[in-house]
Amino acid sequence: MTRVRFRPRPSVKVPFAIRLLKNSPMAIFGVVIIALNVLLAVFAPSLSPFDPYGMDLGNRLFAPGATHLFGTDQLGRDILSRVIWGSRISFEIGAVVVILSVVIGVSLGLVAGYAGGWVDETLMRITDIFLAFPALVLAIFIEGAIGPGLTNAILAIAVVSWPTYARLVRGSAMSIKENEFIEAAHAVGEGKIRIIFGHIFPNLLSPITVQSTLDMGGAVLTAAGLSFIGFGVQPPTAEWGAMVSNGRDFIAFAWWMTAFPGLAIFLFVLGFNLLGDWLNDYLNPRLRGVE
Amino acid sequence: MVKAVDGVTFSLKRASALGIVGETGSGKTVTALSMIRLIQEPGRVIGGAVNFDGRDLMSLSEREMREVRGREISMIFQDPNTSLNPAFRIGDQLSELIVRYNKEVERSDLNFAGVSWLEAVGISDAKRRISSYPHELSGGTKQRVMIAMALLSKPKLLIADEPTTALDVTVQAQILALIRKLKAESGTSLLLITHNLGVVAEMCDEVAIMYAGRIVEQSSVRDIFSHPKHPYTKMLLEAVPKPGRKKLIPIPGSVPNLINTPPGCAFHPRCPRVMDICSKQTPLLKSTAELGTVACHLYAEGEKEVKV
């Protein structure tokens, strides 16, 4: 018989979760917001009434009205279109930051928790160093060194975010590795990598999922902050934080330039926070498992 | 250096069952783990041999040992909650082992094989339950799954370390009956570690009583109950609550700290028949036809004996 490549599926019961989700109005609200954002991002070309970068100097600083539902900015660009297209950038930021920081943070945390000893000490002290700085400050430092721009902003935020996952995962990994099923895997000769990623890691999906959901919002917030002070995204990119920054000088008489992108940031982050909170309540007490 | 196990010798015949009885800290689990070389740093085995089916397990390489574990010698533990990976369904965990140890099973038949095993260990509604996660199962059911996982490789020896201690008494009886039945069907030998003499009475042919890392008495199960020799054994039997008796009779004192074992016989501070020599010389385990196998100065030749 040929060797069977067998991959067990880790524990997530989706249909049950969806039924439970219906009981929480806050969570439903969060999911709705996220869904709306996804629609905006996916269908931006069709939904957006104007070109987000199309300047119309004859129509500058229009208040919200029939043609321009969210008004225009100082260069005549339609705010609604820019907000819609901005959702793409927000998802890009959130997704890439989360993926990078999870890959780095979880790997390091798992290795530290499993190996223990000086490996653990070294990795955790490095983690502590990163955690000692406020996120925004550290991101500014990094971007100061590597230069502004969307890509660099994403990298900087990822660098600031991975330590949370390392910490999160390390403690759990340390306690999980004491269990007999891990000892059993050892006893029959399974390799360390296989044990860490095949046996310990699947038990950590819950806290990682919760944290990454919350981080989607967090990353966007940090990016908005960076753009607001001129780091991060550069003009004319239609990122919400940059738009808020842009509208700063005009806030007295063209409130719509800051209000709508600000509202977009608020809703995006709120949506992911609500979902993340619900996931936390759902995943943690139920799947007590080994912890 | 703390000797968790100090000079333990026993043998186990094919298809028979040996019980190792002792209180917490007596060294029974360490004995079992040493046999399959699962003692972790900083502990280590400093001497001795384990003759298994013609080979000395102590002389095998780690790689060879890995083939032995799980395949020829299986072990089940006390807490089924930490023996199963909570992140995977039990069907998947069973299949992982079937693939490893029952290579003749085709991939398409894995589920069927898994269900068959669950039924063999007495799990009802196996077709549905095979997709369950460990946390959805009761302790008794989990332990049945562990038994299935231990036996599907058709091992020559099953080591069971307090398999029913964490279970309700009624479930305990069922699990023990299951082990007994499967053992009889497959001819597997059983090394059963427990602190419960009642369990030993049901399950084992021979029993060894351990105290502070040494065997103090060893005999057939019948003789242990009808003619216990070592004072510790006698007091263990007395300590079992009996209907009609008003008071509990505990053994005075407590198990010694292995860092600071009492000199001579480790049991002497608690022994009602203690003699002078007991605090000076450690009694050796001696086997005689009339007196059985005991490590006690009361039975040693050439010393002042007291009528037992």
Image (tube, grey):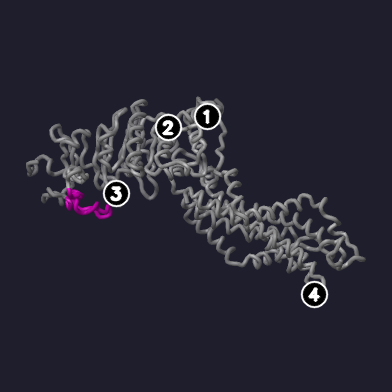
* Residue under the point 86% across and 57% down: A50
What span is colored magenta in the figure?
B246-270
> Which residue in the structure is indicated by mark 1?
B110
User: Dividing the picture into quarters, in which one does residue A216 lie?
Assistant: bottom right
| Secondary structure at numbered mark 3 | loop
- The 10 Å Cα crowd at callout 2, few under 14, some 14 to 19, many 20 or more, is many
Please state the horizontal and vertical placement of residue B144, each as a whole percent of the image.
Answer: 41, 36
Q: Which mark is residue B71?
A: 2
- Give the residue type at disc 1: Leu
Please state the horizontal and vertical placement of residue B125, each as a whole percent of the image.
Answer: 47, 32
Q: Is residue B123 left or right of residue A131?
A: left
Residue A148 appearing in the image: no
- Give the residue type at disc 4: Ala
> Which residue in the structure is indicated by mark 3?
B25
Depicted B48 relative to depicted B188: above or below: below
Q: Which mark is residue A252?
A: 4
- Closest to the observer: A125 or A86? A86
Q: Is residue B1 left or right of residue A155?
A: left
Residue A168 appearing in the image: yes
Indicate which disc, 3 or 1, sits on the residue closer to the N terminus: 3
